[in-house]
Image: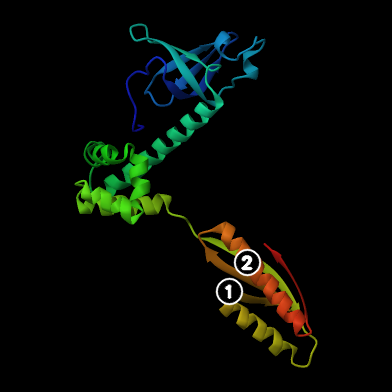
């Protein structure tokens, strides 16, 4: 159940939902943030122009952001509009909802670490960190930094809780290592060609902190782990170019490709 779930949406609120049924003149939307609540978009509220076929604008299974126009709790009616939602607002709402879902997943993991059930964790830990940072997702995110962690403790979060929050955040949000890999072919027909190739590879391993594995003459695999793929790709190309240039300067030949 999402962090911000309420019983009923309010007029003027942006809500995210899933299209569950499309009729000739309306679409039924399941409101993802509100348990067992559905709303209806009339064909006149689908687009800012005349709509001949509503199915060109909404499809079953589609995730959309709509504006709440009207709520009748007694009758259980919720009227929605798609055409009155600006694209920027819709994208921001989707990002917000994803953050809430991620926060719920982390809260569940936090509850396990603290030997609590999820609702207990929500009412104790969750409510306190939300008061500090405004939303649970931001609290988890900030806890990975020293300043963010220190603020939790400073604001009265027990150190045991703060450590658990940081652990969960690192496990769920920390950057994962990615293997950068390239293939290289080296040849040197000089009498001591094997030694030349070996020296070039060993020097490059030391210079770029990479691993090199012999596959079969004349091919080698070059690889290393990184948490920054963009910087890692740049480093890999530099290393491969360095190896080829070095072997060519010593009378050999080489070529490479990034895998």
Residue drawn 27% across and 53% down?
150
In the depicted structure, whether residue 125 falls above or below residue 59: below
Q: Nearer the viewer, residue 245 or 189?
A: 245
Q: Is residue 68 left or right of residue 133?
A: right
Res 105 quadrant in image = top left
Say the numbered circle drawn on residue 208: 1
Residue drawn 69% across and 89% down?
195
Mark 2 element type: helix
In the depicted structure, whether residue 116 falls above or below residue 55: below
Residue 186 location in percent, x, y? 74, 78
Q: Is residue 59 left or right of residue 130?
A: right
**How busy is the neighbourhood of tag 2: few (under 14 within 10 Å), some, or many (20 plus)?**
many
Q: Nearer the viewer, residue 94 or 17?
A: 94
Q: Is residue 231 left or right of residue 13?
A: right
First in sequence: mark 1 or mark 2?
1
**How busy is the neighbourhood of tag 1: few (under 14 within 10 Å), some, or many (20 plus)?**
some
Q: How are the colours assigned in the image? A: rainbow
Considering the image in quadrants, where does the C terminus appear?
A: bottom right
Residue on which the image places disc 2: 236
Considering the image in quadrants, where does the N terminus appear?
A: top left
Task: Quote the CA–CA distance across marks 1 and 2.
Answer: 9 Å
Q: Nearer the viewer, residue 43 or 240?
A: 240
Residue 47 location in percent, x, y? 60, 15
Residue 121 location in percent, x, y? 25, 41
């Amino acid at each position: 159940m999402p962090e911000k779930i309420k019983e009923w949406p309010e007029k003027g609120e942006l809500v995210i939902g899933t299209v569950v049924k499309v009729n000739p003149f309306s679409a039924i939307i399941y409101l993802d943030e509100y348990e067992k609540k559905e709303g209806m978009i009339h064909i006149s509220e689908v687009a800012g122009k005349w709509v001949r076929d509503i199915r060109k604008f909404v499809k079953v299974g589609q995730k959309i952001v709509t504006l709440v126009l009207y709520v009748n709790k007694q009758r259980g009616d919720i009227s929605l509009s798609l055409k009155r939602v600006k694209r920027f607002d819709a994208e921001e709402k989707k990002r917000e909802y994803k953050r809430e879902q991620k926060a719920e997943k982390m809260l569940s993991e936090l509850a396990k670490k603290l030997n609590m059930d999820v609702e207990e964790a929500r009412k104790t830990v969750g409510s306190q960190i939300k008061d500090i940072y405004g939303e649970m997702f931001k609290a988890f995110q900030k806890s990975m930094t020293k300043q963010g962690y220190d603020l939790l403790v400073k604001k009265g979060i027990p150190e045991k809780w703060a450590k658990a929050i940081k652990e969960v955040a690192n496990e769920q949000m920390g950057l994962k290592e990615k293997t950068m890999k390239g293939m290289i072919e080296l040849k040197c027909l000089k009498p001591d060609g094997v030694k030349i190739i070996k020296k070039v590879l060993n020097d490059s391993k030391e210079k770029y902190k990479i691993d090199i594995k012999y596959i079969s003459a004349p091919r080698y695999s070059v690889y290393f782990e990184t948490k920054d793929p963009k910087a890692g790709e740049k480093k890999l190309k530099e290393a491969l170019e360095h190896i080829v240039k070095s072997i060519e300067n010593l009378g050999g030949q080489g070529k490479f490709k990034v895998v």
